[in-house]
Image: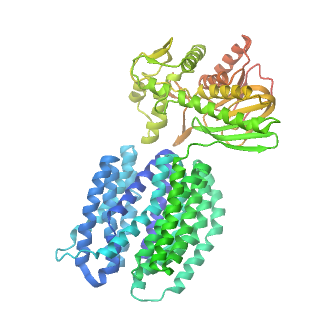
Amino acid sequence: MAAAQLLASLSGFFFWILLALLLHPFAYGEVAWKVSLAMLLSGFSLLGVGKAALAHYARRGEALLRGCLLLGLLSSLVSGALISLLVDPWTGLLLLSLSAFSLSFHFELARRSYKRYLLLWAGARTLTLLLPFLLYLWLGEVRGLLLGLSLSYLLFGLPLLGIPGGRVSPPPLPFTLQAWLADVGAASLSLLDKVLIGSLFGREKLAMYQFGNRFFLLLAVLPQLLPFYLLPERAAGKATGRVERGALLLSLLLLPPVFFFSFPLRSLFPEFEEGIRALLVMSLALPFSTLAQIELSRLYARGEPSPVLLSYLSSLALGITGILLLGREFGVLGMSSGFLLSQLVLALSLLSLPKLGGENRRLAASALTLGALTALLLSSLSAPSLTVRVRGKLVVGEGTAMDTLVEIRVLDDNTARAKEAVKAAYREIRRVEDLMSAEKEGTEIYLLNHSGTGWVELSEETLSILRSSLEYSRLSGGAFDITVKPLVDLWMREVKRTGKLPSPERLSEVRGRVGWEGLEVENGRARFLREGMGVTLGAIAKGYAVDRACQVLREKGVEAGMVNVGGEIRGFGKVWRIGVQHPRKEEVMLELELENFSIATSGDYRRFFLLGPVRIHHIMDPRTGEPARDCMSVTVIAESCLEADALSTALFVLGPERGKELADGLSSSGKVVKAMLVGSDGRILYSDSWDLPRIERLP
């Protein structure tokens, strides 16, 4: 049985590692979300009959297995049908297959048929390393992976159908109910975090978390498979203390190699850097997780599922709360810290709760769970906040808006005035977002995008931005085009989801819905001339929001200020030091000192994913229908941040040579335009007006 568990963990690990090599992070996260959802609901659907078979087979025999089989499969069929309707049929089929396989191996383990148990695991896990990938290559979509997984588990769950007929004995209700609740807790503790992260933080964040978690599970299998193996031995009354101490020691000895192992991982999986950092945090949970498994084995052998249930509930509540709260503040590292918290709480609960009396035990677990759920509720209700810090005369505000980070810096002798100015500027940025976001329901741009070809009444502020956008489209010969939303959705959503490039026919169909000439703007209203069109103001609205925020700071009377919304920056009142990011490394490429300036950078490194060797990013070339290929980044300095924002996108699409020509033409006409264009080959071109420090190629 130990060999089976080791094989299962190794094959599961290699499955996810192969996926990381094959898929871009979004598709990887999509698979992780659906597999986690199917496994979680399978644990719910089995109703604890697996543990009932393990604990009571010795006394009640095959009749008990028949009762467990009937109850577990019927419940799983209902759950599979529901999830097929709500998510997709492939996830529903996977749920049913996992349930059948789980019943199979629990029954063989209950019979102490360890050879058959090993064959089940070896066969299913070996097949999962072949069939899902073959079907993915054949179908070219994520559903091929899900179908392959389903068939692999279903094939080795089918022997259940060959159980000979006879008397049916239902599982003992009190034990089965408690075991089911404990199984629900265990499944939730292992999988609910992934389901929630994928739903609330996005599939790419889940991909990083899942990547680190798979390495953790590989490390944990050696110290944890022994306590799992010892469950039937304990039930038979055998002593197991020496093995338990060895498992704990092994979990501690595994910690140092994790740090050294992380260095080659960074070279092998550069797109999963966050996942590797998550692994370093998660690995600290190894001793706690091993201790929890030892205590679980003891309690199940004594037939005491009640403290297990209470421990899982408290650990789940506190762990999920930690993951969501810390994830909101610190990203994937915060989520990993929440995972560490869940394992620590589980180990402490399993050690302490069984020693309390029944009433005290329930009170302790209830207090932990209630406190965690209260914190979770409050965190879910809280709006995105602005953090304001004071450093002498400098007041710094940091928050999120417009799907990016916002930083507002104010230098003023009057600290109270500066803090109020920072808050007011942040509110202005969020006001612009609520007016011009293409994704938030109810905004003016959202209403325009869902209007078909009918006229939509808009505020003069929004119409002004639309008119400016059309002017930059004329100026750039169509390189700047806010009607590229259908293309952005195609590449950043559909291609992510399917994991394959669009066909020429599909690309041509979407391109037919793009073109700035198809947007008509007149006094008080706007409309599209073709069905299916849509606009996105991502290449101009952030710059406008920065301009508006700086105007608010000036109106508040502050001495000097700087506003940064995702790389679109404007400053006044003093010389500010600005760093232009290297497009391929997380470091500053060039430092500039500027006063009374507006600067914007467009790059292929801000919103992107890799499809094999191809970098897919959000800056679309409306002429080809594909992501623009000739530049890595473009930085523009102009009179307003709106202008810098729009021109950086236009020059990026045009490419280094033609982009330089446009910047030079604007400068010669009297405009303040300075441009630095980094080509896809690493060569850097500058506009003739660039009188700032420069480098010739990427460092």
x, y percent for residue 488: 49, 31
Compared to 102, does 595 lie above or below? above
Say whether residue 296 is visible.
no
Q: Quadrant of the C terminus?
A: top right
Residue depicted at 60% across the width and 78% down the height: 249
Question: Left or right: where does residue 506 sit relative to residue 564?
Answer: left
| Residue at screen point 25% across, 67% down | 71
Q: Position of residue 144 (x, y in %)?
A: 36, 48
Residue 401 in sight: yes
Which residue ends up furthest to the left in the rendered image? 166
Depth check, front residue: 518 or 376:
376
Vertical relation: 378 (above or below) 557? below
Q: Position of residue 424 (x, y in %)?
A: 67, 33
Q: Is residue 339 shown left or right of residue 115? A: right
Is 615 displayed left or right of 446 in the figure?
right
Q: Nearer the viewer, residue 218 or 178?
A: 178
